[in-house]
Amino acid sequence: TETVVSRANTRMEQSHPSSFWHTFCDMNAVSQKPKFVVSRAEGVWLWDEHGDRYLDGTASLWYCHVGHGRSEIADAVHQQLTTLDAYAVYGDFANTPALRLSERLASHAPMDNPRTILTCGGGEAIETAAKLARKYWSVSGKPEKTHVISRAGGYHGLHGFGTSIIGMERFRSGYGEIVADTSVVPYDSVRALEDEILRVGPERTAAFFAEPVIGSGGVYAPPEGYFAAVAELCRRYGVLFVVDSVICGFGRLGDWFGIERFGVRPDMIVFAKGVSSGYLPLGGVITSGEVAEPFWERSGNPFIHGTTYAGHPSCSAAALANLDILEREDLFGAAEEVESQLDAAVRMLAEHPLVREVRSGTGAMAAVELTGEALYERGVTTADVFAEARSRGVIVRAIPRSLLVSPPLTVTWEHIDHLVSTLRAALDAVE
Ligand code: PLP
């Protein structure tokens, strides 16, 4: 056996130098190091290529709501692939899973007479929503309404529009101006949004994009009453209110789209991730009937936009099976439990000398922000904490100042306890 193992190890060492380009990473550093190869996953656990086990404290990249290894989803996809693998929905072509999924999502959307456009992911859905917002105003006789406002800290994917409206400078620099007529306002101020609409001019402002709770920007929940005031403002000035539920949807905030919690009705909802728990890529946009009206009720206004794989039947089948699990196991209700258990556990880290602030309690997600002293005087990095946690068998996520957690909605109290106590040990180790 030993010979077999050592041969396997040699093979793995040799296989690491690779042409695979890890975007988001400094390849000059990463290409010199062994990669972290994930080989298998089951429930809330994953295993690396050496057989070591890790708790998935981030549901991969905020998406695996139902946990890993669900055979129902694999079976549904197998069934679909062997019935109708794929056929484009171009023109009037359709397929049953895409039709069923669109209907099912629309039936839960907090808007009147909703319509669904399917895409292959979140960034593509952001492009779709932003282009649709501009086109809506154009076909409504107001082509000058093109400006899109978003929030500091907001993340909306990294396609053209997403890169232009993202609320974090580091994702934007180096590309020049991709999309004109965009601006960013503070994440928590209704007044700042109104000032910006008035500065740009309501007659030029097309849409406001916001995540219900800012996710990968660092887990920032809105202040009390924020979204009610925003929705009112958008209505008053004729600005489309677009909710980016890519992270907050499908249970992360305990409901379908994450915005229901704040009691408001948006004009569009952008979704992805938890809709299929990432088993296959899928995203989309749900629009209100009012936004759809000029396209559906008047002839001569096609929305000429889309991609080859949008409405893919096998991806739609995966999403339908995933939604079956979310509903059957009431993972919406479970998420509320996870939210309060995670909040209780992670708050204890606020006492840690390296920790400036813990943000949790709105959704099954949390951020642990390090102090300025630790980061800028003592040279501690969140990457160090992340690495210490991973070496102890727990995956968290590092952004420049915070560690983020967003576990699958199937976690138990024991998993949460393990996650948070390992994060504490990782903080201790770098102190
Ligand atoms: N919107 C939000 C809120 C996201 O968190 C993300 C991805 O993390 C996106 C949009 C982009 O989705 P995708 O990575 O599928 O393009």
Image (tube, grey):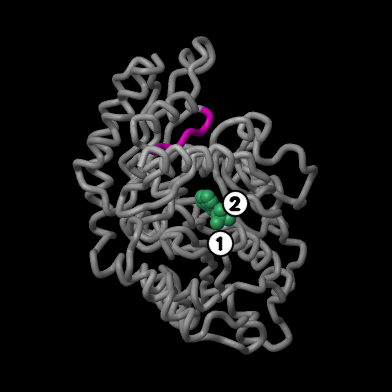
Taking 238 as reference, is 139 above or below it? below
Front-most of residues 397 and 201: 397
Residue 157 - label:
2
Q: How many marks?
A: 2
Quarter in which the N terminus is drawn: top left
Residue indicated by mark 1: 121
Q: Is residue 112 visible?
A: yes
Where residue 342 appears, as percent x and y from the top left, is 27, 40
Residue farthest along the top direction in this orientation: 377
Q: Secondary structure at mark 2?
A: loop
Taking 128 as reference, is 177 above or below it? above
Judged left or right of residue 134, residue 83 is left
Q: Indicate the quadrant where residue 58 lies.
A: top left
For the point 41% across and 68% down, which residue is it?
Answer: 110
Q: Residues within 10 Å of mark 2 (few under 14, many from 20)?
A: many
Q: Specify the segment rendered in magenta.
A: 395-400
Taking 133 as reference, is 336 above or below it? above
Q: Are marks 1 and 2 in contact (CB under 8 Å)?
A: yes
Front-most of residues 111 and 303: 303
Q: Indicate the quadrant where residue 323 lies.
A: bottom left
For the point 67% across and 48% down, which residue is it?
Answer: 163
Asked if the beta carbon under badge 2 is closer than 8 A to the nearest atom of ligand 1, the reply is yes
Where residue 71 appears, as percent x and y from the top left, is 33, 67
Asked if the beta carbon under badge 1 is closer than 8 A to the nearest atom of ligand 1, the reply is yes
Where residue 192 appears, as percent x and y from the top left, is 57, 40
Quarter in which the C terminus is drawn: top left
Whether residue 399 appears in magenta in the rendering, the answer is yes
Amino acid type at circle 1 is Gly
Q: Is residue 228 visible?
A: no
Whether residue 390 appears in magenta in the rendering, the answer is no
Mark 1 and mark 2: span between their CA atoms? 9 Å
